[in-house]
Amino acid sequence: MITGSFESRLFTYSPRLEQAYTLREELTEIFERHYTKAGAKCAIRAWCKRVRQSGIKEFDSFLKTVETWQFKITNYFLEGLTSGFVEGFNNRVKVRASALLWHF
């Protein structure tokens, strides 16, 4: 949980926001641990169950994405690598290409 004064006051007025923040932190912790692929799958499923039990509907779309792509998501735990650099690079290329086309 956040210990800052602003966040504490905010969470006092919105316990649901605090719950959502805590769930997000729990998911981050899963990816910071050294799980096997099977262990990560179990941890992610348990996290998804806690999210559903929270009743926070704003997570629904994200949960569907996690469930759809769980096999590929848990591949991260095989080597701890992502394709983030490549995806970021491709995005920059697309942005620059569209900017060039905009000028013509």
Image (cartoon, helix red, strand yellow):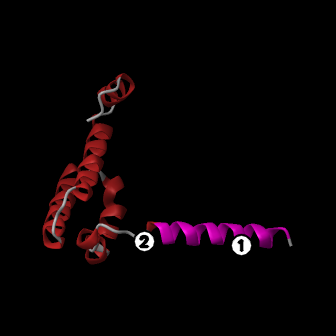
Q: In which quadrant of the rendered image does the C terminus lie? A: bottom right
Give the residue displayed 42% in from the left and 71% down from the top: 83
Along the horizontal axis of the image, is 46 left or right of 78? left
User: Which numbered disc, 1 or 2, marks the residue that appears first in the sequence?
Assistant: 2
Q: Residue type at mark 1?
A: Ala
Residue 38 location, x and y as percent? Answer: 14, 72
* Residue 59 image-quadrant placement: bottom left
In reply to whether residue 87 is colored magenta, the answer given is yes
* Residue 22 image-quadrant placement: top left
Task: Name the residue that disc number 1 marks.
Answer: 97
The magenta span reads 85-103
Task: Name the residue that disc number 2 marks.
Answer: 83
Give the residue displayed 27% in from the left and 71% down from the top: 79
Q: Residues within 10 Å of mark 1 (few under 14, many from 20)?
A: few
Residue 89 location, x and y as percent? Answer: 56, 69
Residues at marks 1 and 2, CA–CA distance in whole angstroms: 21 Å
